[in-house]
């Protein structure tokens, strides 16, 4: 008989009132979690299996990844390869999958009324895949192409260098992504191993199924139970996770020739015991949070040593690892021994201080997760915990747990992973990835740590009383600034948004300097205040949310840091600072859609302010007047854009439009056609999103499957500071740019208009799926963010989603067909982006 659900308030402070969570264990071993969020516009489904790359046989490295790919090649109920992707796309949903060390997950987002069908299809592909032998060769080719593309990704090389700190006998010492060399063995043996791996691990005892949506909790549990109760059990017992770490060591590494240079980084890693009690884990989480309280960052920044500092407990690894990661400046890189000594001294002193006067140990807050990422994180962690052996509960106290932490740090020195740009120092290569590295000998002398410095102080201010506040809206509009007050969802704290005109040229560098100079302030003010910095074609801006009495102190210090970043001396770029870029080349191309300025910029150059929550209107106005005194009195001179606006195609010929080339990175060819909407209205935003939905699956099928041009072929919608754009992107290991350009043009000429000519029923379905994405905000943070960005674009709306909803209501099939016709006839601005190993690296024409 099923265990009855245990209801609880969801431990997620940003969810609206009425959200609930329930968990149920089925007799077959499956673990179900239902999360009711009444304001959720979409349902999130995650199936996580507690088996991953480290569980695969060493004779077939990459087998777990190959199985993940094979899940989508047909199942018992839906046997055709691509059926799952086509169905999800037809609903206007999204899906993806990922293989990690100890868990594999498939996750998708759908309109709520398709949740039951989505559950059926999700569990069908996960537990009843066909795993046809004749499909394996094609997927090996796809995995090989992915692997070759990832050889240009710094994250892959960082992981390869990290594996040199592991025991050679441990599975984590090897690359488990998979490639042709590791998988292209005897096909019969590979197929047999694939089927056996699925039969051994893809069982009910390994499953964690999470559903988040607006449906009542009881209905979610009923649907999940019906879908999962027939899944067979009988999973093989996993081996206990063994110790993976070699004796304490230091590994230096760099990117291979041909990769874009990366920023120097320094990672200090403290492996924790394989088994931790619940209180010991809380002690380590407590220490990780304390490392990010601004004290260490202040000391290092006083010597201009770092640009970023993050500390966290990595629970996914076995054993868990306490990680301190630093991004070094050139100055810090030259003094890396002193940086190391300072960090190691600080963490020992901090642990002892926490042990002598410990505060109550509590689980960390989870508000950093949004509704898309949190269900997946939860499912994966539950799946891992189900598959591993947890230690029994103990009665130890906070003090005992902290004392054990101090003893562990003293007895188990940290491992060090250091990224450098000096390849001449490296004397070895990681076999699978050709990552240059070397094991460094211990330092001959001990560097003296820098003395600790006092972090910034965010002072409180007595607030003005305001018994008769005006109605929410625009309360001040003068020559100096525009002030909006109130509106948005009810919040328990205060928020303050401030935006002001700034030059477009040099924005990325200015933002990087600003983030660096406010690192200590942002860490010190947390968790009382959360601060976000940004800049785009409209303005530089600052957003702070938290205690009303501390907002102005935080804003004043952040503005002072911005002013120092715009000084003549600070504005000069550091010639030693490398630029970093990573990920698939196609991802870099898609990023251009968001970073290239929009064709039309806001005309109003006055500073803009939005204040609300517990901050009164009188206090908002007084504070705004004081802060305006810090900003420059004159507007910046308009700057020359890095790229001109997209032109219209000459005589409607898409292929003849201008081309911008990315700097070479990797051996693949990649191409993207950028298309700009005629304006930034909600109607254009909706039409471009619908057009992407209509074209994406067909574009992938034509270029990737039928023509075999590459392993990335997609149509994606993006916004450049609110301006709608489409990107038709393809990445290929063999086809040249001319071939890719011809293929994109052929697709649009043959299919663009036909795919967008929907009948009334299909159009209504597409519009309904977009409405699920565009509706009222799901959580407070989203409401505040959408309103703030709308105000910055000078839309003058405190509820922009209402305008978007009306635009959706007014859409017709004829308007969608018209925008598709405008694309193929050359009535919309277009631009090509290209990458080739021999790219000229400058603007060129086709």
Image (cartoon, rainbow, N blue to C red):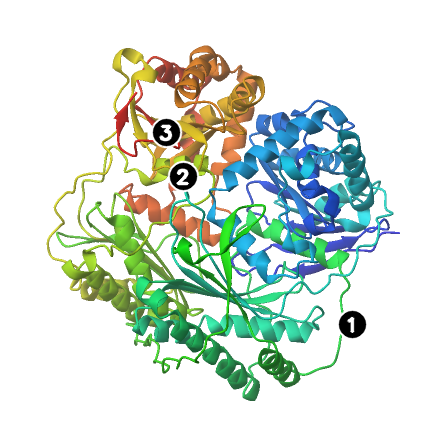
**Residue to which mark 1 is pinned:** 392
Q: Position of residue 293 (x, y in %)?
A: 44, 73
Residue at left offset 58%, top offset 52%:
374
Residue at left offset 53%, top offset 16%:
760
Which of the two residues, 335 or 67, is positioned nearer the viewer here?
335
Q: Position of residue 49 (x, y in %)?
A: 72, 47
**Residue to which mark 3 is pinned:** 834
Q: Residues within 10 Å of mark 2 (few under 14, many from 20)?
A: many
Residue at left offset 86%, top offset 46%:
233
Q: Classify mark 2: helix, strand or loop.
A: loop
Going by the image, does 317 lie left or right of 57?
left
**Residue to which mark 2 is pinned:** 665
Examine the image and state in which quarter residue 704 appears. top right
Q: Position of residue 479 (x, y in %)?
A: 12, 52
Which of the two residues, 267 or 302, is positioned nearer the viewer here?
267
Location of the C terminus by quadrant is top left
Examine the image and state in which quarter residue 480 appears. bottom left
Can you name the residue that lies furthest to the right here?
1
Which of the two residues, 795 or 540, is positioned nearer the viewer here?
540
Q: Classify mark 1: helix, strand or loop.
A: loop
Q: Nearer the viewer, mark 3 or mark 2?
A: 2
Q: Earlier in the sequence, mark 1 or mark 2?
A: 1
Q: Nearer the viewer, mark 1 or mark 3?
A: 3
Q: Quick check: 405 above or below 320?
A: below
Tell me if I can see residue 484 in this picture. no
Instruction: Work out how far the residue at label 3 is from the one at label 2, CA to CA, in angstroms.
Output: 12 Å
């Amino acid at each position: 008989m099923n265990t009855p659900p245990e209801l609880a308030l969801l431990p997620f402070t940003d969810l609206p009132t009425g959200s609930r969570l329930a968990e149920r264990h089925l007799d077959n071993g499956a673990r179900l979690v239902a999360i009711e969020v009444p304001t959720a516009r979409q349902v999130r489904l995650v199936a996580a299996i507690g088996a991953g790359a480290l569980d695969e046989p060493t004779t077939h490295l990459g087998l777990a990844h190959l199985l993940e790919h094979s899940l989508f090649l047909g199942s018992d109920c839906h046997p055709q390869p691509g059926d799952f992707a086509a169905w999800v796309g037809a609903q206007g949903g999204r899906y993806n999958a990922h293989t990690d060390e100890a868990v594999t997950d498939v996750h998708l987002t759908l309109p709520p009324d398709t949740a039951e069908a989505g559950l059926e299809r999700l569990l069908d592909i996960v537990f009843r895949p066909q795993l046809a032998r004749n499909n394996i060769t094609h997927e090996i080719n796809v995995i090989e192409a992915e692997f070759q593309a990832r050889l240009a990704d710094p994250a892959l090389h960082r992981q390869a260098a990290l594996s040199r700190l592991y025991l050679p006998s441990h599975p984590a010492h090897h690359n488990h992504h998979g490639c042709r060399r590791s998988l292209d063995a005897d096909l019969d043996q590979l197929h047999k191993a694939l089927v056996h791996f699925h039969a051994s691990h893809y069982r009910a005892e390994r499953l964690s199924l999470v559903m988040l949506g607006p449906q009542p909790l009881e209905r979610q549990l009923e649907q999940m139970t019906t879908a999962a109760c027939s899944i067979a059990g009988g999973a093989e017992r996993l081996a206990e996770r063994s110790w993976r770490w070699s004796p304490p060591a230091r590994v230096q590494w760099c990117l291979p020739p041909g990769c874009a240079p990366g920023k120097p980084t320094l990672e200090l890693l403290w492996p924790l015991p394989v088994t931790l009690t619940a209180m010991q884990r809380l002690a380590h989480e407590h220490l990780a949070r304390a490392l990010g309280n601004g004290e260490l960052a202040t000391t290092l920044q006083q010597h201009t040593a770092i640009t970023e500092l993050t500390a966290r407990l990595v629970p996914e690894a076995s054993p868990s690892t306490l990680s301190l990661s630093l991004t070094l400046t050139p100055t810090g890189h030259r003094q890396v021994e002193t940086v190391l000594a300072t960090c190691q001294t600080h963490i020992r002193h901090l642990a002892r201080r926490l042990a002598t006067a410990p505060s109550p140990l509590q689980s960390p807050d989870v508000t950093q997760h949004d509704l898309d990422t949190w269900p997946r994180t939860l499912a994966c962690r539950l799946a891992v915990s189900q598959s591993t052996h947890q230690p029994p509960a103990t009665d130890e106290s906070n003090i005992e747990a902290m004392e054990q932490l101090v003893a562990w740090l003293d007895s188990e020195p940290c491992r060090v992973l250091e990224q450098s740009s000096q390849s001449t120092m490296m004397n070895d290569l990681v076999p699978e990835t050709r990552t240059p590295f070397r094991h460094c000998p211990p330092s001959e002398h001990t560097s003296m740590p820098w003395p600790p410095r006092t972090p910034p102080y965010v002072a409180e201010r007595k607030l003005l009383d305001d018994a008769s506040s005006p109605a929410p809206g625009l309360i001040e509009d003068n020559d100096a600034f525009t002030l909006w007050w109130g509106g948005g969802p009810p919040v328990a704290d205060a928020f303050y948004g401030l935006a002001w005109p700034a030059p477009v040229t040099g924005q990325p560098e200015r933002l990087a300097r600003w983030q660096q100079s406010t690192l200590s302030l942002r860490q010190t003010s947390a968790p009382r205040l959360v601060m976000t910095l940004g800049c785009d074609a409209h303005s530089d801006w600052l957003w702070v949310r938290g205690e009303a009495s501390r907002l102005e102190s935080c804003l004043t210090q952040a503005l002072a840091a911005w002013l120092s970043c715009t000084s003549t001396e600070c504005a000069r770029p550091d010639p030693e600072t490398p630029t970093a870029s990573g990920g698939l080349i196609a991802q870099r191309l898609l990023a251009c859609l968001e970073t290239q300025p929009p064709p039309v910029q806001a005309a109003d150059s006055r500073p803009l302010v939005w204040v609300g929550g517990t901050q009164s209107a009188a206090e908002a106005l007084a504070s705004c007047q004081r802060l305006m005194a810090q900003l420059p009195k004159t507007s910046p001179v308009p700057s020359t854009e890095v790229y001109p606006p997209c032109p219209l195609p000459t005589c409607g010929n898409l292929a003849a439009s201008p081309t911008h080339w990315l700097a070479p990175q990797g051996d693949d060819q990649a191409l993207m056609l950028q298309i700009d909407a005629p304006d930034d209205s909600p109607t254009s935003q909706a039409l471009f999103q619908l057009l992407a939905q209509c074209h994406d699956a067909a574009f992938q099928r034509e270029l990737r499957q039928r023509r075999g041009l590459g392993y990335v072929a997609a149509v994606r919608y993006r916004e450049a500071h609110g301006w709608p754009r489409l990107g038709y992107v393809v990445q290929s290991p063999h086809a040249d740019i001319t071939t890719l350009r011809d293929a994109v043009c052929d697709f649009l000429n043959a299919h663009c208009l036909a795919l967008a000519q929907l009948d009334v029923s299909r159009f209504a379905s597409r519009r309904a799926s977009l409405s699920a994405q565009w509706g009222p905000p799901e959580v407070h943070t989203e409401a505040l963010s959408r309103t703030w960005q709308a105000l910055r674009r000078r839309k003058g709306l405190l509820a922009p989603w209402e305008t978007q909803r009306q635009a959706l209501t007014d859409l017709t099939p004829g308007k969608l067909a018209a925008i598709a016709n405008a694309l193929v006839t050359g009535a919309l601005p277009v631009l090509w982006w290209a990458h080739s190993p021999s790219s000229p690296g400058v603007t060129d024409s086709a």
